[in-house]
Every structure is written in C-alpha cells, then in structure tokens.
Amino acid sequence: MKKKFAWRILLFAIYCAVFGSSLHLYQTNVSHPEVKDKGGLLPVKVKSIEHATEKRDFRQLIEKNDKISIAGMQHSQGGHTYYPNTIMINMQKYNKILDLDLEEKTITVQSGATWDDIQRHINKHGLAVKVMQSQNIFTVGGSLSVNVHGRDIRNDALIDSVESYRLINANGQIINVSRTENAELFPLVIGGYGLFGIILDVTLQLTDDELYKIRTKTIDYKEYAAYFEKEVKNDSQVRMHMSRISVAPDTLLKEMYITDYVMAADQKKLKDFSKLKEEKIIMLPKFFLGLSRHSDWGKDLFWTTQKSYAKNTHGDLETRNNVMRSDSLFMEYDHPKKTEVLQEYFVPVNEFADYIDGLRNILEKQEDFNLLNITVRYVEKNDNAVMSFSKDDMFALVLLINQGTSADDIKNTEQVINDMLNLTLQHNGSYYLPYYSYPTKQQFKQAYPPSEEFFQMKRKYDPEERFQSLFYEEYGK
C-alpha cells in the first residue's frame, strides 16, 4: 500500500514538473513570439508584438524603456523591422485616411495605410500618387522608411513628394517634421529604416491621373542606354518606363524588352479606363514562374512568355493609377527549405553595357545560383535623403533570387552576391538597403559614404538606442 502511494506521489510530481515546463514554454512562446520578415532568413523572438490602433497611446510604450522596433508589411528582408527582445510595434491597423485637399492636391494618411488604400480614396477625384513602388501593397510608413522609387521617371524618390510627417521620438514627444520644421530630421527619417522614431502620419503631394498608351519593344542590351536617353528621357510625353533583361540561358543578359507609358493623345478618354483594376491573371504567370525555378528550359519558356505578353500589350491604354497597381500575388512563394530574396543594384546609365558584360561573366560561372528575374528601372540623381541610393542618373536592376535557407545555402548565395556587389561598386554604382545583409561592412561604407554621419545622428536623436533593428546591429554599431 505504501509503495503504491509512493509511486502515485512520484508520478504526480513528474506530471507537475512536465506540466510546469510545458506551461512555461507556452507562456514564453506567447509572450516572446518568433517573428520573420518576408525573406524568412532571420527569425528572432521579440518580447511582444503590439498592434498600433487609433486608441493606442504610443507614448506609454516609449515610457516602458524597452527597446522598440517598428513593422509594417515586413517586405524588407534584412531584419529592419525587428530585433531580439524588443517590443515590435506593428503599424498595419493604424491606417486611416485623415484628409484630402483637392485644391492643393495633398493627402494626409496614417502611416499604416497602404498605397492601395490611397488609390481607392483618390481615384474617383482624378488624382494619383506621384511616387510609390510598382506594387500597391506596402504601407506608407514603410515606404518612407526605405525612401522608395518606382516606374515614374519624372517624379523620382519618394522623399520629393513628402510635405511633412509627425514623428514620435525617443523621448516620447510627438513632433512635426518638414523641410522647415525640425528640418534636420526630415532627410534622416526618410530612408532611415525606423531608427529615429515612429512615423504617425504623412502628408503627401499628389498629381493628376493620366491616360497612357503602352509602347513595347525588344532590344539588345548594348542599345538600351542610347534608346533610353533619346526615346525616353528626352521625350517629355513618356511618363513611366520599365524593362526586363533575360535571365534565360539561351539569351542570358543579352535580350531585353521595354515597356514605355506614353501620354495618350486623347486624355478625354481617361474616364473610360479609370476603374481600378484588380489582379486577375495570377495562375498563368505563377505557373510559368514556378517552371523557371526548377529548370533552364523553364527559364527559357518563361522569358518567351514574358516577351509575348509584353508584345500583346503594345498600343493598350492604361491609367496612371492602374499602371501603379500590381499586387504581384503570382510571386507569392512558400517552401519549407527555400525562400526568395531580392537584391537591387544601381549603376550609372553610361556604365550599363559594360556592367552587364561583367555581370554575365559572374553568372555564367555559377551552377547553383538560381536567378529568376531582373527588372530594370531608372532613377535620377537625388541626394535629398542622407542615405540616398542614387548618386548619379542610374539604372536600377532588381534581382529576384531563389535560394535555400540552410547555412550552406546562405553562404553560397553570399559569395555570389558579394562578387556582384564588388562589380557594382567598380562601376561607380551602389545598392539598395532593404534586403538581406549579404553586403560586407566595407561594401556598405563604400556604397554609402554618408553612413557614418547617419549613424552619428541616430545616436544624437536616440542616445539610449531605443529604436533597434538587426540592420542597425549589423552596420551601425
């Protein structure tokens, strides 16, 4: 009898220990959730995730003296939106449209609003966004934090269309920031990756919606720079431009197709095309992109399909709002052992052909580097943000790369990217900062000479380094 009782006590004790351990693990996972950005290569546990809302007093979070990170859609891929054991403030629900001034053509929105939210609000008034990414899914606050650019070649980096914004600083104060008020902060916060405070709301300049006629052309890469200078940049009727260069083995970095958006002759037809389009053609491009992930012949087929689709759009009419409306659902990708990362390199227009030859030389030596796409855009010289990426008139090459998530896969990708970065820097180029931290600190400093000043100013305005990120840890400390 005593033995049975002793066994029961022992079993009960073991059960209590296991239950307690499980409860502790559960509470830890709930109170310290794991977060990842779109790239998925840098998972960390944060202290908590706090969702910004209209009623939430942000200053109470500042007063807690915890480290803070700020997140939107989290499409930045280098840990810019989180840091271990921080309070991560997710801004997506802080998304109201606050004011639309039709006479001044300005709009004021909370920073969690997306470009889609803005487009739906202004389209009926015949207005459009000046500068945004080529997709409309991103938050305005996140877009300011990376100082985005897009297809528009007449309106450059986002900073130029920002009139003002309100910021909660490291002291918990809400301040207005513009070119005349707290002016020193203006070019630091835009392109500042959330390191100076929480952007609350933003006033943006808008422009008129316009009707464009699509013009497409297939071209050899050696002819591209001259074509752009003569037929695009020097023609004021061309408002937007983008191109793609082949990553298919048969035509690797040799063949390009171009899409220009030219002012339509009859702008009175605008109302006939002004209904906002929704993404409908998803499965077909998703199918061909999937094939290109797995084989060279898939890449050749995908390139042929892309060219054919572009050719078929020649002569079509499309509004500015709809050109800037793709949500790229077909690019969504979920794989247990792989992910897709972006890189973006900026190279002076007059260096383009030589740069492409060097890039091809690097890629032809690779066996396991899975490059899926390169989109080319144009960015005009702009040093209005402290961490400006366009120190000359440049072409921006956006690379989509499929890679494994293991340590070996990351290392292999890093080696190729470092080679491409060295080539970019040799051609007086630079690279975009929102992506995975493959660049070395030396490459970072070479591409961004003002970075030392930038991080000094971060510590001036945030001496206790309350606002944190993995990006800051990698390059700023």
Image: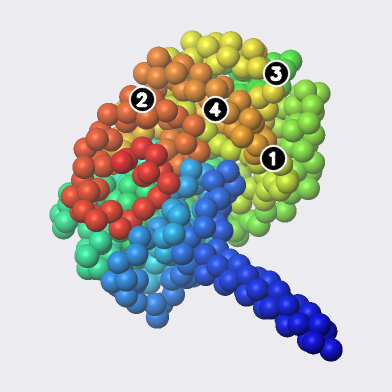
| Residue 230 visible in the snapshot | no
Across and down, in percent, residue 135 comes to 55, 48
Q: Which residue is mark 2?
A: 442
Q: CA distance from mark 3 to mark 4?
A: 14 Å
Q: CA distance from mark 2 to mark 4?
A: 14 Å
Q: CA distance from mark 2 to mark 3?
A: 27 Å
Across and down, in percent, residue 69 comes to 40, 58
Q: Which residue is mark 3?
A: 367
| Residue type indicated by callout 4 | Glu
| Residue type indicated by callout 3 | Glu
| Residue 415 visible in the snapshot | yes
How dense is the environment of label 1, judged by Cα within 10 Å: few (below 14), some, or many (20 and up)?
A: some
Q: CA distance from mark 1 to mark 2?
A: 28 Å
Q: Which residue is mark 4?
A: 414
**Residue visible at 40% across and 19% down?**
425
Q: Residue furthest bottom?
A: 1
Across and down, in percent, residue 302 comes to 75, 30
| Residue type indicated by callout 2 | Gln
Q: Earlier in the sequence, mark 2 or mark 3?
A: 3
Q: Which residue is mark 1?
A: 338
Q: Earlier in the sequence, mark 1 or mark 2?
A: 1
Residue 252 location, quadrant: top right
